[in-house]
Amino acid sequence: MKTRMLVVGVALAALAAAADVTGKWKATFSTPDGSTRENTLTFKAEGEKLTGAVASQMGEAAIEDGKVKGDEITFAVTRNFGGNEVKLMYKGKVSGDEIKFMVSFGDREFEMSAKRIPT
């Protein structure tokens, strides 16, 4: 009985552990005009805390309020569009070497997919 409880406890602890997202990821998404864009996401996870940056053709922006809980990842990035600061909110689900994101800002949102860049 003790062995079974230990196995169940270890399995539950493994499920509760944050996904391993540390490293670089290549993200792709489509803009409203149909263009495909790429970003490079650099993550460093320490427990549930997530730091790093998002790099695009607009430059690099630091990750704000980053968290990893189980297979869920959330963070924000502030960008400047035509003199206006816009906060983009990222919410994703990690599955191995892929993350599926929903990115929102204001009343708009779009999907983005990221794949881990092998080291």
Image (cartoon, rainbow, N blue to C red):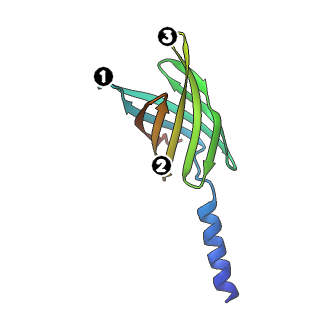
Task: Mark 2: give few (<14), some (14-19) or many (20+) Cα within 10 Å.
Answer: few
Q: Which mark is residue 97?
A: 2
The amino acid pointed to by label 1 is Asp
- Give the SS element for disc 2: loop
Q: Which of 43 and 63 is in front in this view?
A: 63
What quarter of the picture does the C terminus occupy?
A: top right
As measured in the structure, the alpha-carbon distance from the residue carrying label 3 to the one carrying label 1 is 18 Å
| Residue positioned 50% across, 38% down in the render | 25
Give the percent coordinates (x, y) of residue 82: 49, 10
Q: Based on the displayed image, in which of its 4 quarters is residue 18 positioned?
A: bottom right
| Relative to 22, 33 lies left or right | left
| Residue positioned 54% across, 14% down in the render | 84
The amino acid pointed to by label 3 is Gly
Report the residue marked by disc 1: 33
Report the residue marked by disc 3: 82
Marks 1 & 2, CB-CB < 8 Å contact: no
Q: Which of marks 2 and 3 is nearer the N terminus?
A: 3
Reply above or below: 27 against 94. above
